[in-house]
Amino acid sequence: MKKNAMNIKKLNELQQDDSAIIIYQDEVHFQLNTSVTRKWVLKGSKPKVKSAPGREKTSYSGYVVSRTGELIVSKPSWFNYETVIESFRYLLNNYPIEEGKRIYLVLDNAPWYKKAVRLVQTEALPEYADIRNKMSLIISSTVFTRFKSNRTGMENNS
């Protein structure tokens, strides 16, 4: 059985387990850059368009609790394995779990997650025990069904 198929099977089993808290994580990057395509002006005039110089970017890491839809958001300065591990700790500090429960965190297969999983879970380094004791990390690139927009609504594109 392929690894992703095993992860999907495991997630289906975990959904039936009351002690399991499944949380999906993804990151987003917003960029601000100005572009003027059209403008109504008098012919021959030279209008000035005020805009911020250069490009600005902000990134967020979002966690969605599957049973409740609750959203927990952190704002890392950059995405690498170190900021991802900080983000895991942010989640644990901002989403306390009851005794006897465990978080199963579903991640995509971005390189920064792969290294974080290796350090926290596979190599089980002691400095990450606080994360490992409360959370299991699952990398899966095929958990989500892909959708594309069309004029009549959303169409399944899997």
Image: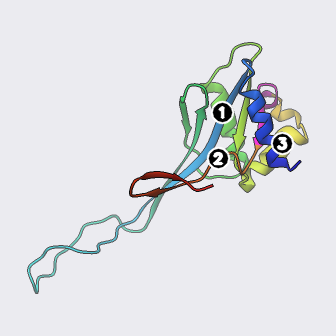
User: For the residue labelled by badge 2, is the local secondary structure a helix, a strand or a loop?
Assistant: loop
The CA span between labels 2 and 3 is 14 Å
Q: Which image quadrant is residue 43 in?
A: bottom left
Which residue appears at 35% of the width and 67% of the height? 34
Which mark's residue is nearer the viewer, 1 or 3? 3
Q: Which numbered disc flags the more N-terminal residue, 1 or 3?
A: 3
Residue 84 image position (x, y, % from top left): 69, 44
Query: From the image, which quarter does the C terminus lie in?
Result: bottom right
Left or right: where 20 falls relative to 32:
right
Q: Is residue 47 above or below residue 100?
A: below
The amino acid type of the residue labelled 2 equals Phe
Residue bounds of the magenta highlight: 130-138
- Which label number is shown at residue 144? 2
The amino acid type of the residue labelled 1 equals Ile
Q: Which image quadrant is residue 92 in?
A: top right
Which residue appears at 74% of the width and 12% of the height? 99
Q: Which numbered disc flags the more N-terminal residue, 1 or 2?
A: 1
Which mark's residue is nearer the viewer, 1 or 2? 2
Q: Is residue 120 magenta?
A: no
Provide the residue designation for mark 3: 6
Residue 97 image position (x, y, % from top left): 68, 19
- 24 vs 60, nearest the viewer: 24
Q: Are marks 1 and 3 in contact (CB under 8 Å)?
A: no
Left or right: where 122 falls relative to 49:
right
Which residue appears at 61% of the width and 31% of the height? 66
Provide the residue designation for mark 1: 23
Residue 20 image position (x, y, % from top left): 73, 23
Q: Which numbered disc flags the more N-terminal residue, 2 or 3?
A: 3
